[in-house]
Structures are given as structure tokens and as C-alpha cells.
Amino acid sequence: MGLDIIERNGTKIAIVSGKEKVITDIESALDLIATVGYETGANRIVINKENIDDSFFVLSTGIAGEILQKFVTYQTKLAIYGDFTKYTSKPLKDFIYESNSGNEIFFLPTKEEAIERLANTY
């Protein structure tokens, strides 16, 4: 996993790079939060949905809720970007809609939109 750091509007944002799955379970999500915080001092993370295990997007597993709760608990904003149109589950679409209506977790189509949302959310 690589981490690129940018600053927008006076806010540090860590961008996860690489091809490997970075978030596969609760422990790996906590590792990401800790690594980003320790290595960069950022509390905002942009990650491609391809870096997240597919089980995250199956809401019946409960993994997404538990992982996202860790980000909220540790005051780390998260923007996941990618093509979500392949998911047909109404509960997942509702989950994405609700997340995008808040101020902590976002699902966006492009990396640039993810960066902008985190840079402009307080």
C-alpha cells in the first residue's frame, strides 16, 4: 500500500494507492486509520473501492457498518471512490445515499470528487 498526501483548503488528505486489498476486515481498517494518522497526521482518507474486500459491499455481513463505525469513532473521514453502479442491492444503494448525506463517510464516482468532498467537509 502506498500513501500519497495532499493538502486542500488547509486540510491534509491521505490517498491510498496500490492494487492490494487494504480493507478486508475490522482489524485492517483500524490498521489503516492508525497508519495514516501516525505516518501522515491526516484524519481524512481517500480509497478506491477496488482496495476494499467485496464482502464490505454485502450489507448482510455487517462488515461495512462495523468498519465505518471505527472511522467515525476515531474521527477519521473516509471517501471511497469507484463505480458503484454494478451493485443492485436496494439496501446498499440506500446505505450509500445515507452516507453521502452525512459528514463522515462518502461514496463517490471519482478520486477527484472524493478529494474535493473531504477538503470541503468540516
Image (spheres, rainbow, N blue to C red):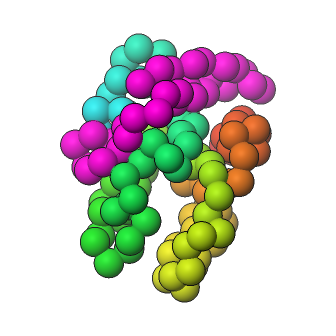
User: Residue at point 33% right, 28% down?
Assistant: 34
In the rendered image, which quarter is residue 28 located in?
Answer: top left
14 is higher (above) or lower (below) than 91: above
Q: Nearer the viewer, residue 41 or 52?
A: 52
Q: Is residue 72 left or right of residue 29?
A: right
Q: Where, by quadrant of the figure, is residue 87 drawn?
A: bottom right
In the image, is residue 82 part of the stretch drawn in magenta? no
Instruction: Pinpoint residue 39: horizontal percent, then vertical percent.
Output: 41, 14
**Residue drawn at the location 54% of the way across and 85% of the way down:** 90
Task: Return the residue found at the far top.
Answer: 39
Assign the N terminus to one quadrant of the image.
top left
Asked if 78 appears above or below 40 in the picture, the reply is below
Q: Residue furthest left?
A: 27
Q: Read off the magenta span.
A: 1-29
Residue 86 visible in rendering = yes
34 on left or right of 87: left
Any magenta on residue 19?
yes
Q: Position of residue 71 (x, y in %)?
A: 40, 47
Which of the 4 image quadrants contains residue 111?
Answer: top right
Residue 50 image position (x, y, % from top left) = 50, 47
Residue drawn at 48 percent across, 16 percent down: 40
Q: Nearer the viewer, residue 108 or 41?
A: 108
Residue under the image location 38 percent in, 71 percent down: 58
